[in-house]
Image (cartoon, rainbow, N blue to C red):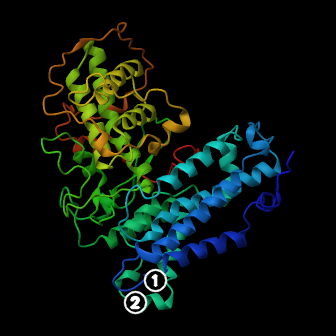
Amino acid sequence: MRRRDRSRSSARLHAPTAEEQEKTLAGFAQHFWLPPDNFNTPPWQGERAARIVHYRHRLLSEVEDAVGDYGPLGCVCEFGDQSKEVTSRWQRFAFWDDVARMSDVLFRGPIEPRHADEIEMRLHDAWRRLRSSIADLHEFSALTIDFRVSAVRLVMMLETERPPEAAQLDGQFELPNARTLASLLSLRCEKDDGEEVLELYRLLCQKLQGSTCVWCNEPFDESTSAGLFEGEMRYVVPTTVPKVFVPQCGHAIHTLCFGSQLIPESDQSSRGDCRRCQMPYAWSSIDVEPMVNAFCLLFSPFVDKRAQDMNADGRISQSAIISIAEVCINFSLELAGLVSASSAWLLLARRGSFKHPDVVEIIGDEVMRLLNLPPEGDADDLTEPVDDVSPEDAENPCKFAVHPETLHVPRDGAFQELEDDPLDLPPPAQPEDCPPSPGSEAEVDLGDIQDPSAVMLNQLVEGCGGDVTLSGLRPLQ
């Protein structure tokens, strides 16, 4: 049998030292400040972009080397039973995975939203393989927290350590813009202090000073734009949601306005495009997790309210089913297919907590049936529904990414022939200790989601804390 050369892998089993971490982050900053090829070439094109791509693949190699493809990672380690080698792999993975995901901001400009599909899928595959060695995620988090990369610290490095030669060049070497800050803050972790995160969101608002929201045309002041929304709803995965999103074109939008933007309307031609400059939003994988969190936080109360109404009426409301399906389609279109409409529903159903989960399951069957209707003329060619999803895949929105042209968007009135069906459920029980529904907190009836922004705001409570990292799989402390 051929003996495997383990010299390279063995040298990488140790956890990254403080010196190694400092050197890596310094190298990250150096790549951020790489000069453009010339004054006519933006920093996200040409030789500079090629060097960034090469650097990202080196980071990816570090992540995959930390996981390895042999040894104890083939079995689950019981609580407290992992070896020093496994612990070192966990810690090394945590550090390099954070750096690799954050490196998407190094391009410093509007790049294709699917430019890093291969890297993202390989990172996800590495996490899935590492996950097989973890019996307790809380223990994993406790052992790796010191090796996570602080988004706050990295932002401050980029803000304060601009090289002198960069200051002498033109505006392409300006300090990190609002897009860069928003992207890095979306990858914050347990090491980031809540107050420091809030301060950086205030800095983000300062960088947006003078501009207004593309939807409501209101300025980005501290109360509407700085900080996070945090839901009290009992999510399977705790979520925090920023109050503002910044696309690649730089024309920011309030999170609540983004939710209003998903409401079905007659003109669908602007889906996926900035409503101000008409350029594609070009959201990338770094945006997916916070936007999925926002989608779930904003529309879980609506689904819960509709489920309660259907349970009380004993019938399926097809108008509500259609509204939910259209919102999922619109969300997918706004993200240019980074998340499919079917995956949007699966994530919403999985992450939300509902008073009548049995009714929501029936709603889900109807929504998935509508989302998988064939195009006109292809009645015999039904799209296979996505209904068998592993827990890891369900928490990875990009896993079910599709190109927007493959979405079967219904024509006006295409669903109108559907009639309400009886809801085959036992009489609703009303135990005294039944927890209140998240959607029942607001006294305003959402109706058919005509203008939900004010109602959505009532479903949210301000505050910091919580985190979703590693595609939603790492627990909070």
Q: Is residue 463 left or right of residue 298?
A: right
Quarter residue 107 falls in: bottom left
Q: Position of residue 254 (x, y in %)?
A: 28, 56
Could you tell me the amino acid type at mark 1? Pro
Q: Is residue 285 left or right of residue 474?
A: left
Residue 354: percent from the left, percent from the top?
Answer: 40, 27
Name which residue lies at 61% across and 65% down: 58
Residue on which disc 1 sits: 35
Is the residue 333 above or below the residue 431 in the image? below
Between residue 45 and residue 100, name the one nearer to us: 45
Looking at the picture, how far across and down is residue 374, in whole percent? 27, 28
Determine which quarter of the picture holds residue 315.
top left
Is residue 440 shown to the viewer in this render? Answer: no
Dot 1 lies on which element?
A: loop
Mark 2 highlights which residue? Answer: 169
Check the image and report above or below for 435 versus 6. Answer: above
Q: Mark 2: which amino acid?
A: Leu
- Say if mark 2 contacts mark 1, CB within 8 Å: yes
Seen in the picture, residue 271 relative to 340 is either above or below; the reply is below
Left or right, 446 with respect to 172, comes to: left
> Which label sits in the foreground, 2 or 1?
1
Q: Residue at x 30, y 67 (%)?
A: 250
Residue 181 seen? yes
In this orientation, which residue lies closer to the viewer: 65 or 27? Answer: 65
Q: Is residue 410 left or right of residue 386?
A: left
Q: What label does residue 140 carry, if any?
A: none
Vertical placement of 264 versus 204: above or below? above
Q: Position of residue 444 (x, y in %)?
A: 21, 34
What is the CA distance from the residue labelled 2 to the residue labelled 1?
Answer: 9 Å
Q: Residue at x 65, y 73 (%)?
A: 22
Give the crowd class for mark 1: few <14, some 14-19, many >=20 residues within 10 Å.
Answer: some
